[in-house]
Amino acid sequence: MKLAAHTDRIRAAGRKALVPYFTAGYPDDATFLDLLATAADTGCEVVEIGVPFSDPVADGPVIQQTGHAALAAGVTLRRTLELAAAHHATHGTALVIMSYLNPILTMGVDAFADAAAAAGVSGVILPDVPHEESAPLRAPLSRRGLNLVDLVAPTSGAERLEVIAGGSEGFLYLVSLTGVTGSALNTDGGLLEFIADVRRRTTTPCYVGFGVSTPEHARALAPVCDGVVVGSALMRLVRDAAGPDAALGAARRFLTTMNEALNECPEGNAP
């Protein structure tokens, strides 16, 4: 199922989507799959799976650390898709693969699209592929029923934002700041106005990511967006946990609290 079918259903039901990010295979394959199951159990209907990569350009220090550990343990793009397939076999979660372009080119675009579709993946995020250069990837993915998620940022500019927002699929990823994942988020200033401006330009659900890390962030963003992505704050809990059981407990508490904050206010569920 294309990602759009999942995200449209979530919005139609009046819910805000909490999208957790997990580094594939971290801290180990079994715990990673348990983390995906925990996310589903706490009401997360869309999950982002990061493919470990040696030279990330958008990831902050926490996700870089977990990615390097996963690489050292032998986690590859193919292994990531195998793990995605294992989760998909028992859960209805919409899985979104976040990768950089190099691993996909190494595998081959068509081979990747085939493998991702077979694994039950619904969407793909490629932060190092500009919208203007995405057509050679977008078309093969779309033919296999996958959406390519576009990203926009406060620096995108009105004209370019209009083009990207108008052609977005699945969800439009709103980068909340000019920095890497895990940077401090400021919900004051122009962020809320930026989000509102983007939503006026598209009918695609708008999810906000980069720096979203607390229930207070979720409450502040809920009235103006359709969902939020949480990565570094969650992976920090997993990284710093004393062991697998502690990691799962910490993830469950965090996701439960974030989901409650995101969806607690009736006015925050208005489209």
Image: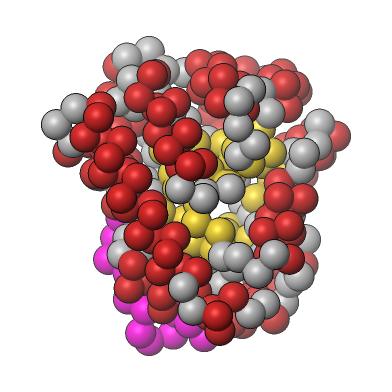
x, y (%) of residue 78?
A: 55, 16
In the image, what residue occupies the spot 41% across and 75% down?
A: 219
Task: Determine if the magenta segment contains residue 187.
Answer: yes
x, y (%) of residue 237?
A: 24, 44
Q: Is residue 93 left or right of residue 122?
A: left
In the image, what residue occupies the spot 56% across and 59% down?
A: 17
Q: Is residue 238 left or right of residue 152?
A: left
* Highlighted magenta segment, given as a residue range: 182-194
Which quarter of the rendered picture does the N terminus lie within?
Answer: top right
x, y (%) of residue 46?
A: 58, 47
Give the image quarter of residue 186: bottom left
In the image, what residue occupies the spot 31% across and 64% down?
A: 214
Location of residue 65 with respect to 72 vertically, above or below: below
The answer to which of 65 and 204 lies nearer the viewer is 204
Task: Determine if the magenta segment contains residue 243.
Answer: no
Location of residue 198 with respect to 209 vertically, above or below: below
Which quarter of the rendered picture does the C terminus lie within?
Answer: bottom right
Q: Is residue 5 left or right of residue 46?
A: right
The answer to which of 74 and 56 lies nearer the viewer is 74
In the image, what residue occupies the spot 69% across and 81% down?
A: 200
Task: Report the magenta stretch's main SS.
Answer: loop
